[in-house]
Image (tube, rainbow, N blue to C red):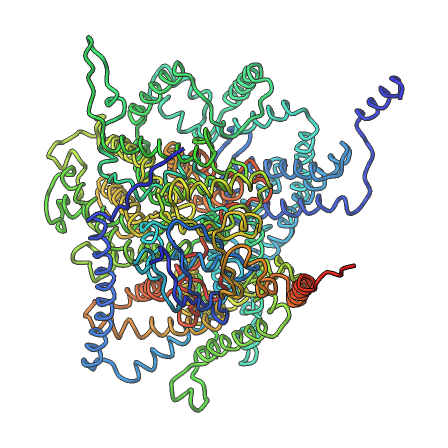
Amino acid sequence: MQTTLRPRRSPSRTETAFEAAVNVFLWAFRIILVLIVVVGSYLTITSGKFTVDTWVTLIINGAVQGGIYALVALGYTMVYGIMKMINFAHGEIFMIGIFAGYFTAEILEDFGILNASALASLFSITLMMIVAATISTLVALAVERVAYRPLRHSPRLVLLISAIGASYFLQYTVRGLVGPGIFKYPTIDVMEEETGLPILSALGMTWIQVIVIGSALLMMAVLYAFVMRSKQGTAIRAVSEDKEAAALMGVDVTRAVVITFGVGAAMAGAAGVLYGLYWGQVQFYTGFIPGIKAFTAAVLGGIGNIPGAMVGGFVLGEAESIGSLLIIDGLGVPSPGQLKDVIAFTILVMVLMFRPQGIMGERLSRSRA
Amino acid sequence: MALLETRNATKRFGGLTAVNDLSFDLDEGAIVSVIGPNGAGKTTFFNCIAGFYQIDEGSITLDGTEIHEQRPDKIARLGLSRTYQNIRLFGGMTAAENVLVGEHQHLESSWFRTVFRSPKRLQKGWTIRGRHLHLPVSSVDREEAEARAEAERLLAYVGLEGTADTSASNMPYGDQRRLEIARALGASPRILLLDEPTAGMNPAETHDLTGLIRRLRDDLGITILLIEHEMRVVMDISERITVLDYGERIAEGSAAEIQSDQRVIEAYLGKAAAEAEAERIETAAEAASTPAESD
Amino acid sequence: MTAQTATAQTSADERPDWSLNTDRHAWKPVVIAGLLFAFAALYITLVGLVNTFHERDTIEDVITLGQTMLLVTFGSAGYVGATRAPKGPLNAIIGAAVTGLITGAALSALLIVGPALDLRDFFPNASPDLYNLLSGAEFFELENTREMWRGEAFPVTFWFPSVVAMSVGVVGGLLTLMPRRARNLIVLVIGAIIVMGMFASVVRSPMLQHDATSGVARDIFSSSGLRMPGAILVAVSVIIIYAIWVVFHPRERWRAVPAETKHSPLLTIPAGALVLIVVLLLPLGFTGFIPAVIALIALYALMGLGLNITLGLAGLLDLGFVAFFAVGAYTLALLTSTGELGIAQWSFFVAVPFAMLAAMGFGILLGLPILGIRGDYLAIATLGFGEIIAILARSDLLKDYIGGPNGILNVPKPLASMGIEIPPDHWLAGPNQIYYISLICILVISFIAIRLRDSRLGRAWVAIREDEDVAEALGINLVQTKSLAYMLGAAFAGLGGAIFAALYGSIISSSVNLNVSILIVTIVTLGGMGSIPGMILGAIVIIGLPELFREFAEYRFLFYGVALILVMRWRPEGLLPSRVGRQELHDDEPALEGEEKPPSSPGGPGEAPATSTGGA
């Protein structure tokens, strides 16, 4: 049975033209973006519109926001590392944390504990964070059990759509439970005051800012120690790297996954309280956009990489805070604050396009397999 | 000049060097096997050639053209096709459709003409009062028909006659392996990389497949590079065998040469076995050179 | 063994075992089921579903939809409890009772705890109305005062939900003991009554228009549900239809969607003609807001078909679909609006191609950079783009051109834009114009999709979707092929946006949001990826239902979320899947031994993620 082999076909002219166009386009994209950043910054700085104080305030704000992003990003990065899926519902876990904190705060206020004294306030905040972390964890574990675990052998697309479904379900459940309104955190008087501490008060930092950044750093340190030193943490890292090998070594994969979800959710829940304390209000859809931005932070730092998530979070927070004034305002855009979110999304796309392994990810191979 | 040449190809994954300074020639029309213990880097080597991985050092040339920095689809268009260690068919498609995807680079139809061609009904036409009226057959339909015929021919060639419309995921294991080969043939390759084609097959199927591989070279003139663990196949059809271990080439030669090569034995069976084998050969040699005791 | 003992043995086996299983562990699944259903019962009450649905009758003066929800929950609890109980009819009944009781007890607990703690601060739905409903106040004709709900005492009848739940649960459990046919029949009758109750207002409205049917309509339907005679009518009809069906298909089990059946042409042609007539005349049978709903369904079906090419064929999860929708809508608005932001007063039909071209242009612009990214990351990247466009739409930066939050107004309907005035009652009034235009577009897109699907390009798309790396190794240029799918999807999204602007006479920035993208993705996913009839069904369900039932509208995303999770779990290929989808996603036949499914494309955007190691 003979078949004939056909002669080689060289690509048609349209194909080569298209190729060339794509390359030109990608380069133009890069150049335009660099130009925007450079020109915008230049114009802002030379205009002298903003004082050093303004920049310092922005940097501090950026650190606060960045700390929150970092905590939420940890959940994304850990879940991606171990399950190779994007937990779309993580932003809602964060939002549930904010609400849990709110309710706890309301109760504490009704009982007069919230503002009784500085110590009482500190105790209150800690309690709020514990409650929020617990509730977020419970919800996250339920979601994992119902929406993700049955699908762990399904194609990635199916899992992602299920995650989207879970995200919407959580959002609208909360909306159904508490209503669509805005919920304002009760004020904790102590928090608004400037710290009496030497360096920090020179920067004009208030207690709330210190607490947010401080707790964030503390939690990250604890998490890092857990993942690096403890037996369970090592198990998680093993499963992240090679699920089958870990299973063959006797690691309980399901338990590792559950613990990962739990820890990530606890971080996010606590971060929710910090968010609520800082920004003061919450609605049922408040978790969504910060969730995507936290994911951006995780990708920016290197998905699957825990220190990377921390770095990415702070970098993104600063970029947002400084960028809107530095770049966008410089270009003469009215109401630059409106476009703040654009910064985050642009960073996301740029990272995915040009450096997908993020800041701290290792370039193991340029592989397509 | 050999059809496929690699020079000092090196591929690292972080701290692990999977392919180490590998230089290798593949002449046109040859059937060459690459063997080695598990983890020796054979599939990685294939992946590098096919463009799945980019080598960190060295070069790979196909018929004079450097391919080590090319995308896989460019490499495919230069005449290289492959199959996979774990079968990777398009499960949602039929056998014929799988092969048709293989023929992709040889089909020309633009999407514009695909949308706007005249319907088949009008092309078949009607006969009115002895005269046959029809719209001209569109080039798209003609090309599709030819491609489909070719697909069926290829399926028959690999021994899958009549399975054209069977869903790929419903086919038995042995047939799926053949289908993967048929799909690779759809691209009319000059060189075919086969990654463990007989894995999981029983002796009868293995024998058939070995014959098929030979025919690919004898009938179609395709150069074959083969990764195999089944030694009978390797020794049977290979003109030359290259042995890898830890990403390096440790031996190369004919079947006989490889079988008695110490380093190869050591790689597969360990040092003790190699030494035992060496002793055995020595003793045999001594016995042969010692004159027989005569009465 | 003699014949006698054999028969004695078999008859012993046939007699049901009425013993009671006392093994504690055997009852654990029952208790767990009870707790799950208790959680579900609390959920639907606190989320407000019961309250909201209480507004709508299932059978007027007999039972409301809210109460029906509760009863169905109780019955299901009992059913599940019975199936999880140890074997034996007595055990089953007890299992059903236990799960029912636990479920009801949760609600009873709510009745005790709720008023005492005044949960309304946290959960507005824990209201006196809810408590009245749960405690059966109307049945006992109790005047539960408002003060009572403020924590003075808990309701006298706090045990009511527990008792009801247990009883209904036992009924549910009894269903498991019935023969299959009887069970199916009961479920069908109940289901039919519920569904007809929900659809009552839709069916009633055209019937009221005509004298011949209006009398009957008033007898059968109330303003929001069935009347008793109507319920009886539904029940009897279902029984009759079921009986007929059983006679003709004695052995077949009921399948949600029939397997590939071959229809004889004798049946298809008149059936097809009937469908065609219904589709063409559909909007004419209704008045009020329903024609606009029908037009909207057609519009979303159109966009679903567009996304079907990108997602269903090529497997690109585009969560930023709304971006192209926006481009198309704003372009059309700019080109046809008679208001101050309109830059030309072109007719609708001239402007639409330009809207599509603009959308396609954006498709290339946004697509090229990101189409090298893989899998999940592509989805997030497209999401980002969608959000960027949404932000730009309402920004001050572009306010002078496209109106900011107020958008562009005074977009004329298609015929009006050509200067043809149509009186509102005419059959070619505004929404109907949109409907017919959408129908034509649906036909065109379907045509294109079918043509492309069975071609080289279509195969390349499916190959990319199934196994991108292998597709590339076979000579397929990934970026180019994906771009084509992406651009086509963008073009049709733009078309949808343009029609949308014409339908509502304006385009405002709040219409440009992620929910639109998700809605269309849900339509494609639930309907069946790659399948055209699936798309249409999806649009009807997802767009039509909330529009027709306002109570659902508030909770629509809740239902969509649940639906997505359930469908991905049980039927990922969708409700009306294409052949390919069914093969890919729903292997009914297990793989042969030693075989593996082709691995899906690895995660990571084109590069190995930091934590992976290389292959052997």
Q: Quarter of the image containing the N terminus of chain A?
A: top left
Q: Is residue A19 visible?
A: yes
User: Is A183 left, or right, of C185 in this rendering?
Assistant: left
Front-most of residues A48 and C307: C307
Camera-side residue of A335 and B292: B292
User: Which residue is found at the position 31% from the left and 34% from the top?
Assistant: C298
Q: Is residue C605 above or below residue C534?
A: below
**Residue C245, percent across and down?**
54, 17
User: From this viewpoint, which residue is outermost toward the front?
Assistant: B295
Residue furthest to the bottom? A198
On screen, residue C575 versus residue C481, left or right, reads right
Q: How many marks?
A: 0
Which of these two is toward me, A310 or B109? B109
Image quarter of residue C534: top left
Q: Quadrant of residue C336?
A: top left
Please provide percent x and percent y for residue C133. Answer: 57, 41
Residue C546 in sight from this viewpoint: no
**Image position, residue B66 (x, y; %):** 31, 60
Q: Is residue C251 above or below residue B142?
A: above
